[in-house]
């Protein structure tokens, strides 16, 4: 057991070191983490033999739960409102059209059956927000475009997942029809939204009722809610990924104690899960097998991630107010990520005839997409004039940001033991010092005779 733990520690450390290499060589992190897994694999210097697709799928699905929830948690309501229609159109109809058009191309260029072609295309139809934003870094992409790219990428995985489940059902039963498939998709989306909305509404009131007063426990509470939300949606045949994304957006746009620290904790978990997921997927692939897919993989990559993507984006964004340059950039920003690779493991676990070919081809296309689009994304945006570098940064420190400076805040609700009491009469924990009291839009100096009211926001430090 000690040897295995030592190896895991070494792989994690090497993955962290690869971040430095990634920045210096300007290679996407996704590629670096996958490369670490491939080097650690049976055909690399590590010599670790791993071909358990079921385990890889389970680990990947668990990682996706945190990645999608964390993405929702950091999505601002204003951005959702401003880009709701174009981004949701791309995330739903766009995924469907991409899968159909790509499926036709795959059918005529490969030896896959029509069902296999459509399934494969559905697996690579979603885009990856983390890959896009990691390549853009801190560049000042116009907010209008950034919102569309982020929200589309964050919300199109559930649609792709629903399509995959529907297509896999065709392999299991000949009774599946387009009508039943349409009902299935509507049920997935409808129940996913309903469950996500319910959990988005009850999560914070439940934490308040349980009197959770430590940020560590609040993070654990959020993890429990994520698992319950995803699990319940899945059990009733709704879309669990859509449910946790909706819940994440709703929770992230509410005010609550230890909000920034909770988001930071979820971000930490998400990064660890991403590293784990990429390394596992790198271990799962056998690089020597990819050599057989260089020609067909490169051709399909260009046709699917460039041609089809441009056709779909230009067509669906036609009713909206976007210039041709903006449409092209949104098209080019449709990077593939780890999600298609995770989805492709389902072909192996379901025992499909061309499962290994589907997995290898998906892996190749993802790598091709990240290298071609990812490494050129920032330069394309600059040439199109979509970065507003002249925009001055807001130097004012928001109240929420003070929490990151070891100053915490507490929002007093009606159940708080501090309300309707003078500060001098409070039984504060040892080391806690009240710095300021915010009441509505004004700040109050925390003198001993100040009476605290429900709705007050207390800024405090604690040693």
Image (cartoon, helix red, strand yellow):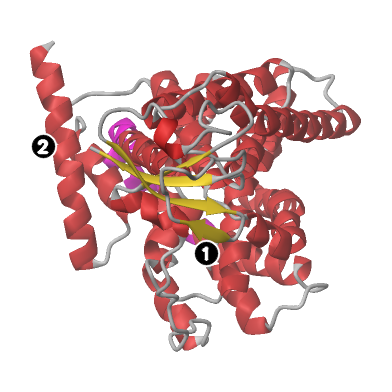
Foreground residue, 425 or 39? Answer: 425
Quarter occupied by the C terminus:
top left
Q: Main secondary structure of the magenta part?
A: helix
Q: Residues within 10 Å of mark 2 (few under 14, many from 20)?
A: few
Which of pointers 2 and 1 indicates the residue nearer the eye?
Answer: 2
Q: Earlier in the sequence, mark 2 or mark 1?
A: 2
Which residue lies at the image location 73% right of the left edge and 21% below the top edge?
Answer: 237
Q: Residue 175 in the image: state x and y as whole percent.
A: 84, 19
Image quarter of residue 142 = bottom right
Real-space CA distance between mark 2 and mark 1, rounded to the nearest whole angstrom:
32 Å
Q: Are marks 2 and 1 in contact (CB under 8 Å)?
A: no
Quarter occupied by the N terminus:
top left
Q: Residue 136 in the image: state x and y as whole percent.
A: 41, 68
Foreground residue, 123 or 434? Answer: 434
Image quarter of residue 22 = bottom left
Magenta span of residues: 279-300
Which residue lies at the image location 13% right of the left edge and 26% below the top edge?
Answer: 7
Instruction: Name the mark on residue 45.
Output: 2
Q: Could you tell whether 328 is left or right of 64 in the image? A: right
Image quarter of residue 229 = top right
Instruction: Name the mark on residue 364.
Output: none
Height in image: 300 above or below 212?
Answer: below
Question: Is 387 part of what is drawn in magenta?
Answer: no
Q: Residue 174 in the image: state x and y as whole percent.
A: 80, 20
Q: Residues within 10 Å of mark 1 (few under 14, many from 20)?
A: some
In this view, the residue farthest toward the top is 1
Find numbered disc 2 in the image and state the secondary structure of the residue it sits on: loop
Instruction: Name the mark on residue 302.
Output: 1
Find numbered disc 1 in the image and state the secondary structure of the residue it sits on: helix
């Amino acid at each position: 057991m000690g040897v295995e733990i030592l190896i895991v520690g070494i792989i994690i450390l090497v993955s962290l070191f690869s971040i430095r290499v990634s920045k210096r060589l300007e290679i996407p992190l996704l590629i670096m983490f996958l490369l670490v897994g491939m080097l650690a694999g049976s055909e690399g210097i590590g010599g670790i033999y791993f071909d358990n697709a079921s385990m890889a799928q389970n680990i990947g699905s668990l990682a996706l739960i945190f990645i999608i929830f964390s993405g929702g948690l950091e999505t601002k309501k204003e951005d959702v409102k401003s880009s709701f229609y174009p981004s949701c159109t791309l995330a739903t109809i766009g995924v469907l059209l991409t899968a159909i058009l790509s499926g036709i191309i795959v059918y005529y260029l490969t030896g896959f059956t029509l069902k296999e072609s459509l399934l494969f295309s559905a697996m690579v139809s979603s885009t990856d927000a983390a890959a896009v934003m990691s390549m853009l870094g801190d560049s000042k992409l116009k907010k209008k475009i950034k919102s569309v790219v982020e929200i589309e990428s964050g919300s199109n995985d559930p649609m792709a997942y629903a399509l995959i489940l529907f297509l896999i059902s065709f392999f299991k039963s000949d009774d599946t029809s387009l009508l039943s498939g349409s009902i299935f998709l509507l049920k997935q989306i409808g129940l996913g939204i309903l469950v996500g909305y319910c959990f988005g509404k009850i999560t914070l009131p439940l934490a308040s009722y349980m009197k959770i007063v430590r940020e560590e426990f609040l993070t654990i509470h959020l993890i429990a809610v994520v698992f319950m939300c995803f699990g319940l949606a899945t059990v009733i045949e709704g879309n669990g990924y859509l449910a946790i994304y909706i819940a994440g957006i709703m929770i992230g746009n509410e005010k609550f104690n230890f909000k920034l620290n909770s988001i930071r904790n979820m971000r930490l978990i998400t990064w660890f899960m991403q590293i784990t997921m990429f390394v596992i997927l790198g271990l799962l692939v056998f690089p020597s097998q990819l050599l057989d897919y260089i020609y067909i993989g490169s051709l399909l990559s260009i046709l699917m991630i460039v041609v089809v993507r441009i056709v779909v984006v230009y067509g669906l964004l036609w009713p909206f107010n976007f210039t041709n340059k903006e449409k092209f950039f949104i098209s080019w920003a449709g990077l593939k990520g780890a999600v298609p690779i995770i989805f492709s493991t389902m072909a192996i676990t379901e025992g499909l005839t061309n499962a290994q070919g589907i997995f290898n081809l998906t892996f190749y296309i993802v790598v091709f997409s990240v290298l071609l689009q990812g490494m050129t994304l920032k330069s394309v945006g600059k040439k199109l004039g979509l970065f507003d570098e002249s925009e001055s940064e807001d130097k004012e420190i928001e109240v929420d940001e003070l929490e990151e400076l070891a100053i915490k805040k507490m929002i007093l609700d009606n159940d708080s033991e501090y309300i309707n009491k003078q500060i001098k009469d409070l039984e504060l924990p040892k080391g806690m010092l009240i710095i300021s009291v915010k009441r509505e839009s004004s700040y109050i100096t925390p003198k001993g005779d100040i009476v605290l009211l429900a709705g007050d926001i207390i800024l405090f430090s604690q040693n």
